[in-house]
Image (spheres, grey):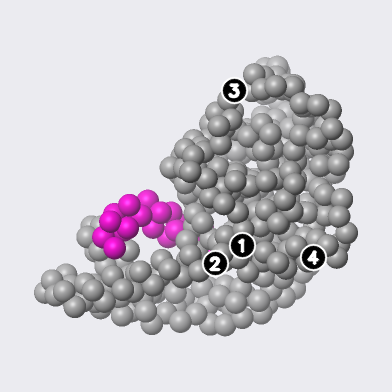
Amino acid sequence: MFLGSGTRCDYWSEFRHCKSLKNCFHHYYTYGTVPSCQQWKEDYHNCREWEKHRGTEAKEALRRSEKIRVAEQRNFIPVWQLRQEPPRDWHVPLNQEKPQDS
Amino acid sequence: RKKCRLFTQSPSKEEYGYDLFPERKPGEHKKTSIAESLFTFNHKCQVMLQFAVETSPYAKLLLSAMKSSGCKVFKDRHFSCEDCDGTVSGGFDAASSQIVLCQNNIHQQSHMNRVVTHELIHAFDHCRAHVDWFNNFRHLACSEIRAANLSGDCSFTNEVARFNFGLKRHHQECVRGRALRSILAVRKISRAEAEKIVDEVFDSCFNDHAPFGRIPHSKRDAKFAYRDYMNRDRYYANL
């Protein structure tokens, strides 16, 4: 998420947010369980490691973790088909549309 | 308060919820006079809408996402403050690509923020996917599930305010219930049928958090999500 983005290992703020009482409450309210925040902590340490020593191992570990995070967000079968282009009439001015049957 | 009406062009406008929006005559678009604009609910609605799009991290993220998807939102074109029947708060009119805000039923900024977010989620779905609002109940249900899930409609405090006291996994119950009610309000199907449709699409649609990347339970969550969204190009390039 923050590899080379210039925001300097903000995984720690995500970790703290994850472990906060409010977030734990929201997670329980949504999923019935307490969130697991360990991955954010590991990512932070890998990020700091990479910042200091530019090691490829740390970088690869980070990349893997982020890829898993992205995959988790796409872990469902969509109900609809995604568009290749926006709807044609999105910008058509009002009062120029054809009158509808009523 | 009922949240949303998704309506469409139809020979029988009552069938699809248009009767709740009496100012929304197909083919006509009413212009307000200056006098009407300054001293009425309409003016208040416009002011609250402006504040919402400028300050709500939920709305800002959705507006950015829509712009990236080719559906830049212009306030004057894509939003309309109107009087509505009953207690409905707003709706998305796919036929005219407009979000309707019920100026006579929205009186607080926090409510406006939520309605704007909710309807923008429908607009976002319309923009990025081939949603068949007219004929496909699964699509309708899916967008309602997403809107209830991601807009803050089902936050703990909002539910408590409605005297719905629940804790463990209550968010999901709320989302299910609101999606069901929204469908039943605009389409003539039985409750059992509507429940079946919601059940069929629930897992998929509840887990579709686009464009937030997470369920934003608070403004703070939404700000995190907004930051992630704005950094996404560099993020994907780095991956």
Figure check: A2 above or below B82: below
Which of the two discs, 3 and 2, labels the residue nearer the N terminus?
Answer: 2
* Residue B62 point in image, percent of width and height: 51, 47
Residue B136 visible, this angle: yes
Foreground tag (3 vs 2): 2
| Residue assigned mark 4 | B195
Residue under mark 3: which chain is it in? A
Residue under mark 4: which chain is it in? B
Name the element at disc 1: helix
**Res B175 quadrant in image:** bottom right
| Residue assigned mark 1 | B205
| Residue assigned mark 2 | A76
Residue type, numbered disc 4: Glu
**What's the residue at 86%, 55% (across, down)?**
B189
Badge 2 local density, few (<14 within 10 Å), some, or many (20+)?
some
Residue B141 in the magenta stretch? The answer is no
Q: CA distance from mark 4 to mark 3?
A: 38 Å
Q: CA distance from mark 1 to mark 3?
A: 32 Å
Residue B161 visible, this angle: no
Residue type, numbered disc 2: Phe
Report whether A64 appears left or right of A88.
Answer: left
Which mark, by number, is residue A93? 3
Magenta highlight range: B215-239
Viewer-nearest residue: B103 or B66: B66
